[in-house]
Image (cartoon, rainbow, N blue to C red):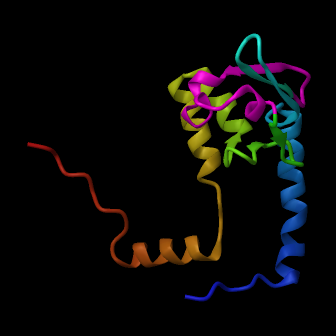
């Protein structure tokens, strides 16, 4: 199935909302301004947009736990500050996801799910309409 190309006018119309969303995330400290691997502690340390430092142990991320110190030192930050990237390891980590999961509290994880579920697309809207035409989401049945 061929993918529909998004018209330039539609992209331009979405820019103000995207910029506003990015500004809110930046102000809330859910973006990184820098990232580095700290070999003595075995952690990746990020400076967040609100001035806080956040570090996480490499051992807590399966994709990174077997990497060499040289590979880990090659951490890059995507321009928006929302993704850590290791080219050689083919690994990407979400900065907001790392922050939310570090809290380990159920309500914070539900916040991550709420934010992650906000994606809107024509395909998602069409799927939702089709599901609604079938009677909506199936009801949970009691397990016996």
Please state the horizontal and vertical placement of residue 142, each as a whole percent of the image. 16, 46
Q: Residue sitting at 58 percent across and 76 percent down?
A: 123
Q: Nearer the viewer, residue 139 or 31?
A: 31
Above/below status of 66 relative to 79:
above
Q: Residue sitting at 90 percent across and 62 percent down?
A: 16
Q: Which residues are magenta?
A: 48-73
Q: Nearer the viewer, residue 50 or 44?
A: 44
Please state the horizontal and vertical placement of residue 71, each as a whole percent of the image. 74, 35
Q: Quadrant of the C terminus?
A: top left
Q: Residue furthest top?
A: 40
Left/right placement of residue 14 relative to residue 59 reads right
Instruction: Write down the quadrant of residue 1 in the picture.
Output: bottom right
Above/below status of 113 relative to 34:
below
Above/below status of 67 relative to 113:
above
Q: Residue sitting at 72 percent across and 19 percent down?
A: 43
Q: Nearer the viewer, residue 125 or 29?
A: 29
Q: Residue sitting at 83 percent across and 33 percent down?
A: 28
Please state the horizontal and vertical placement of residue 60, each as a whole percent of the image. 57, 24
Left/right placement of residue 46 relative to residue 69 reads right
Instruction: Write down the quadrant of residue 105 in the picture.
Output: top right
């Amino acid at each position: 199935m061929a993918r529909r190309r998004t018209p330039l006018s539609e992209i331009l119309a979405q820019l103000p909302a995207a910029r506003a969303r990015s500004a809110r995330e930046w102000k809330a400290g859910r973006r990184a301004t820098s990232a580095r691997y700290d070999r003595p502690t075995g952690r990746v340390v990020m400076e967040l947009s609100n001035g806080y430092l956040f570090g996480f142990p490499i051992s807590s991320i399966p994709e990174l736990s077997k990497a060499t110190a040289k590979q880990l030192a090659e951490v890059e930050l995507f321009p928006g500050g929302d993704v850590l990237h290791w080219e050689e390891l083919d690994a990407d980590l979400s900065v907001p996801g790392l922050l939310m999961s570090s809290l380990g509290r159920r309500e914070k994880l539900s916040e991550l799910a709420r934010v992650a579920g906000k994606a809107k697309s024509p395909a998602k809207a069409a799927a939702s309409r089709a599901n609604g035409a079938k009677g909506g989401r199936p009801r949970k049945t009691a397990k016996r």
